[in-house]
Amino acid sequence: MATETIRPNGNANTLWSAFSYTLIDDVVTDPSSSGDSTYAMADEDDEGTEQTWDFEALSTLTSISSVEVFVRHKDDGISGNPDAAVNVKIGGSWQTGQNISYTGTYSWVSKTFNGSWSDSDFDDFEVGITSPNDIGRGREYLVSVVYAVVTGEAASSTTNEAFLLFLDSL
Protein backbone atom coordinates (compact mmCIF):
# COMPACT_ATOMS: atom_id res chain seq x y z
CA MET A 1 0.00 0.00 0.00
CA ALA A 2 1.05 3.57 -0.67
CA THR A 3 -0.03 6.89 0.82
CA GLU A 4 -0.58 10.39 -0.49
CA THR A 5 -1.05 13.55 1.58
CA ILE A 6 -3.60 16.08 0.35
CA ARG A 7 -4.44 19.54 1.70
CA PRO A 8 -7.28 22.07 1.49
CA ASN A 9 -7.44 24.13 -1.70
CA GLY A 10 -10.85 25.81 -1.50
CA ASN A 11 -13.84 26.73 0.64
CA ALA A 12 -16.83 24.43 0.12
CA ASN A 13 -18.88 26.73 2.37
CA THR A 14 -18.30 29.88 4.41
CA LEU A 15 -20.16 29.37 7.69
CA TRP A 16 -17.59 30.12 10.40
CA SER A 17 -16.48 33.60 11.43
CA ALA A 18 -13.00 32.88 9.96
CA PHE A 19 -13.20 30.12 7.37
CA SER A 20 -10.68 30.50 4.54
CA TYR A 21 -8.77 27.37 3.57
CA THR A 22 -5.62 29.52 3.41
CA LEU A 23 -5.78 29.71 7.21
CA ILE A 24 -5.46 25.92 7.62
CA ASP A 25 -3.40 24.68 4.64
CA ASP A 26 0.02 24.94 6.32
CA VAL A 27 2.49 22.37 5.04
CA VAL A 28 3.17 20.81 8.44
CA THR A 29 2.32 17.35 9.70
CA ASP A 30 1.67 15.71 13.05
CA PRO A 31 3.60 15.90 15.43
CA SER A 32 4.92 19.30 14.30
CA SER A 33 4.01 22.14 16.61
CA SER A 34 4.11 24.66 13.77
CA GLY A 35 1.16 26.07 11.89
CA ASP A 36 -0.50 27.95 14.74
CA SER A 37 -0.14 31.51 13.46
CA THR A 38 -3.32 31.39 11.34
CA TYR A 39 -6.54 29.53 12.03
CA ALA A 40 -10.15 29.03 11.07
CA MET A 41 -12.41 30.14 13.90
CA ALA A 42 -15.91 29.40 15.14
CA ASP A 43 -17.41 31.67 17.79
CA GLU A 44 -20.74 31.80 19.61
CA ASP A 45 -22.57 32.62 16.37
CA ASP A 46 -21.18 29.45 14.77
CA GLU A 47 -22.09 26.90 17.46
CA GLY A 48 -22.76 23.46 15.98
CA THR A 49 -22.14 24.51 12.36
CA GLU A 50 -20.07 22.48 9.91
CA GLN A 51 -17.39 24.34 8.00
CA THR A 52 -16.27 22.39 4.91
CA TRP A 53 -13.22 22.69 2.68
CA ASP A 54 -12.38 21.33 -0.77
CA PHE A 55 -9.15 19.32 -1.08
CA GLU A 56 -6.50 18.70 -3.71
CA ALA A 57 -7.10 15.83 -6.15
CA LEU A 58 -5.16 12.60 -5.81
CA SER A 59 -2.30 12.15 -8.24
CA THR A 60 -0.65 8.82 -7.44
CA LEU A 61 -3.24 6.43 -5.97
CA THR A 62 -6.02 4.11 -7.12
CA SER A 63 -8.17 1.59 -5.19
CA ILE A 64 -8.38 3.64 -2.00
CA SER A 65 -8.88 1.77 1.31
CA SER A 66 -8.72 4.54 3.92
CA VAL A 67 -8.33 8.23 4.57
CA GLU A 68 -6.96 9.58 7.84
CA VAL A 69 -7.81 13.21 8.59
CA PHE A 70 -5.44 15.15 10.85
CA VAL A 71 -6.65 18.26 12.69
CA ARG A 72 -4.64 20.64 14.88
CA HIS A 73 -7.09 22.57 17.06
CA LYS A 74 -7.89 24.07 20.45
CA ASP A 75 -10.51 26.00 22.34
CA ASP A 76 -10.15 29.50 23.69
CA GLY A 77 -12.02 29.33 26.98
CA ILE A 78 -14.91 27.01 26.07
CA SER A 79 -16.29 25.56 29.30
CA GLY A 80 -16.98 21.85 29.58
CA ASN A 81 -15.14 20.97 26.34
CA PRO A 82 -18.07 19.65 24.31
CA ASP A 83 -16.82 17.62 21.35
CA ALA A 84 -16.32 18.94 17.87
CA ALA A 85 -16.62 16.50 14.93
CA VAL A 86 -14.84 15.72 11.67
CA ASN A 87 -16.43 14.23 8.56
CA VAL A 88 -15.42 13.52 4.97
CA LYS A 89 -17.28 13.55 1.66
CA ILE A 90 -16.08 10.84 -0.71
CA GLY A 91 -17.71 9.99 -4.02
CA GLY A 92 -20.41 12.59 -3.38
CA SER A 93 -21.48 11.03 -0.06
CA TRP A 94 -20.77 12.13 3.47
CA GLN A 95 -19.40 9.39 5.70
CA THR A 96 -20.39 9.00 9.38
CA GLY A 97 -18.85 11.88 11.34
CA GLN A 98 -16.49 11.21 14.25
CA ASN A 99 -16.12 13.24 17.45
CA ILE A 100 -12.80 14.97 18.10
CA SER A 101 -11.85 16.15 21.58
CA TYR A 102 -9.70 19.21 22.25
CA THR A 103 -8.15 21.22 25.06
CA GLY A 104 -7.12 24.81 25.73
CA THR A 105 -3.77 24.27 23.98
CA TYR A 106 -3.15 23.26 20.40
CA SER A 107 -3.08 19.50 19.93
CA TRP A 108 -3.27 17.03 17.05
CA VAL A 109 -6.08 14.55 16.60
CA SER A 110 -6.69 12.16 13.72
CA LYS A 111 -9.66 10.10 12.63
CA THR A 112 -9.66 7.32 10.04
CA PHE A 113 -12.44 6.55 7.56
CA ASN A 114 -12.26 3.09 5.95
CA GLY A 115 -13.91 1.92 2.77
CA SER A 116 -13.36 0.91 -0.81
CA TRP A 117 -13.15 3.81 -3.24
CA SER A 118 -11.62 4.66 -6.60
CA ASP A 119 -9.37 7.64 -7.19
CA SER A 120 -12.23 9.37 -9.03
CA ASP A 121 -14.28 9.25 -5.80
CA PHE A 122 -11.76 11.77 -4.46
CA ASP A 123 -12.32 14.28 -7.28
CA ASP A 124 -14.78 16.16 -5.03
CA PHE A 125 -13.27 15.18 -1.66
CA GLU A 126 -14.19 17.51 1.19
CA VAL A 127 -13.47 17.63 4.91
CA GLY A 128 -15.99 19.15 7.29
CA ILE A 129 -15.48 20.13 10.90
CA THR A 130 -18.51 20.75 13.08
CA SER A 131 -17.87 23.27 15.84
CA PRO A 132 -18.85 22.54 19.46
CA ASN A 133 -22.50 23.16 20.37
CA ASP A 134 -21.73 25.30 23.41
CA ILE A 135 -18.95 27.76 22.56
CA GLY A 136 -20.38 30.64 24.59
CA ARG A 137 -20.01 34.40 24.51
CA GLY A 138 -16.46 35.68 24.02
CA ARG A 139 -15.02 32.22 23.41
CA GLU A 140 -13.69 30.54 20.27
CA TYR A 141 -12.91 27.16 18.73
CA LEU A 142 -9.74 27.37 16.59
CA VAL A 143 -8.45 25.04 13.83
CA SER A 144 -4.93 25.77 12.60
CA VAL A 145 -4.13 22.82 10.29
CA VAL A 146 -6.16 20.18 8.43
CA TYR A 147 -4.78 17.60 6.03
CA ALA A 148 -5.58 14.05 4.92
CA VAL A 149 -3.40 11.00 4.33
CA VAL A 150 -5.02 8.70 1.77
CA THR A 151 -4.01 5.03 1.58
CA GLY A 152 -4.41 2.90 -1.54
CA GLU A 153 -2.68 1.17 -4.38
CA ALA A 154 -0.06 3.15 -6.28
CA ALA A 155 -0.97 3.83 -9.89
CA SER A 156 0.85 1.39 -12.12
CA SER A 157 3.93 2.69 -13.88
CA THR A 158 2.60 1.27 -17.16
CA THR A 159 -0.46 3.48 -16.88
CA ASN A 160 1.67 6.48 -15.96
CA GLU A 161 4.09 5.84 -18.83
CA ALA A 162 1.24 5.46 -21.32
CA PHE A 163 -0.27 8.72 -20.10
CA LEU A 164 3.05 10.53 -20.41
CA LEU A 165 3.51 9.18 -23.96
CA PHE A 166 0.02 10.39 -24.78
CA LEU A 167 0.83 13.87 -23.44
CA ASP A 168 4.05 13.96 -25.44
CA SER A 169 2.09 13.20 -28.61
CA LEU A 170 -0.10 16.28 -28.21
Image (cartoon, helix red, strand yellow):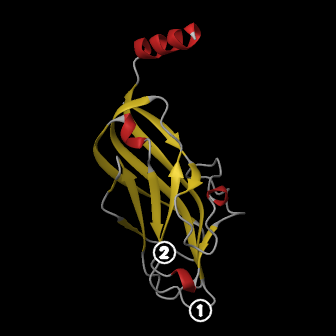
Q: Which mark is residue 137?
A: 1
Specify the quadrant that holds the C terminus. Answer: top right
Few, some or many residues within 10 Å of mark 2 (<14, 14–19, 20+): many
- Amino acid tagged 2: Ser
State the image coordinates of residue 75 (x, y, percent, origin top left).
Answer: 57, 77
For the N terminus, the image quarter is top left
- Write down the quadrant of residue 137 in the picture: bottom right
Per the image, label 2 sits on a secondary structure element best described as: loop
Q: Residue at x 38, y 35 (%)?
A: 119
Classify mark 1: residues with Cα within 10 Å, few (<14), some (14-19) or many (20+): few
**Drawn side of residue 11 relative to residue 85, left or right:** right
Is 87 displayed left or right of 8 in the figure? left
- Judging depth in this view, the residue of 137 and 167 nearest the camera is 167
Query: As drawn, which residue projects farthest toward the right?
Result: 37
Residue 39 is marked as none
Q: Secondary structure at mark 1?
A: loop
The residue that appears at 54% across and 72% down in the rendered structure is 15
Q: Residue furthest bottom?
A: 137
Task: Tell me what residue is drawn at x 45 percent, y 79 percent.
Answer: 48
- In x, y percent, where is residue 107? 55, 65
Residue ID for mark 2: 131
